[in-house]
Image: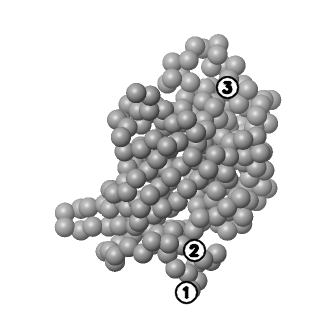
Amino acid sequence: MDTAPKSGVIELDDVSKIYRTGPIEVAALRNVSMRIDDNEFVAIVGPSGSGKSTLMHILGCLDVPTSGAFRLGGHDVGAFDENRLADVRNTFIGFVFQQFNLLAYLPAWRNVELPLVYARVRPAERRQRAMAALATVGLADRAHHRPGELSGGQQQRVAIARALVTEPAMLLADEPTGNLDSASTADVLDLLDELHASGRTIVLITHEADVAARAQRTVRIHDGQIWHAPSMDRDATPIHAGSPTSGVGA
């Protein structure tokens, strides 16, 4: 049976994530339910320790819930084996991180083609697709520059091109502007706007309200729960109130 996601629709139903060390339990997520539709631009916002990183790991198929259901395109991710999860991560999701994670000794286009190397795409096609991805982010003229010859904003654009080269349905960006100055931050956010306008689903993880404001919709997470209120004030109430636990993950 084909278990490949047919769309980018993301559904979490009563998802919890508990980390256990001996008798100690730490609840990183508690009864989280949410939906992200195709071609949405959603920001997930929360302070350090709120659970947003754990939520990102689950959305990126880097971790699995302790309980609850996580579905991609109608398919239960919990039913995927390790090989299928790896396929989903490599083809369905494009990752962008705060640290650019570029190889210093390779030029930009070689960095961008790396996911295609792992996918065993032929060299000529790899280069063609890498150059096209760099053109998409406005760096075709920097294809032969190494990371040390690029500004921080340009390095993040190379990282975004690398995330796009497999033509994923969803771009998952974890604090993508965290290491950038204000001008480079604006450039990267403008690029995310353009990618969303072209039909890409974007999930942006951030703790910065002004960055989150660029998204269509903001999901706020606090103490491992999704909250109703537009700000984290005392009147805010969680969508699902879980039982008290001994701690909350990052």
Question: Where's the N terminus, which quadrant?
Answer: top left
- The mark nearer the N terminus, 3 or 1, is 3
Give the residue type at disc 2: His
Q: Give the labeled residue for mark 3.
A: 130
Callout in the foreground (1, 2): 2
Q: Amino acid at mark 3?
A: Ala
Residue at figure coordinates x 72%, y 25% from the top left: 131
Q: Is residue 241 visible?
A: yes
Q: Is residue 42 left or right of residue 27?
A: right
**Front label number (3 vs 1):** 1
Residue of label 1: 234
Q: Residue at x 31, y 60 (%)?
A: 19
What kind of residue is marked 1? Arg
* In the image: residue 30, left or right of residue 219: left
Q: Earlier in the sequence, mark 3 or mark 2?
A: 3
User: In the image, what residue occupies the spot 55% across and 86% down?
Assistant: 234
Q: Tags 1 and 2 in contact by the CB under 8 Å rule?
A: no
**How far apart are labels 3 and 1 at the CA level?**
48 Å
Where's residue 20, x and y in %?
26, 61
Q: Disc number at residue 91?
A: none
Residue at numbered disc 2: 228
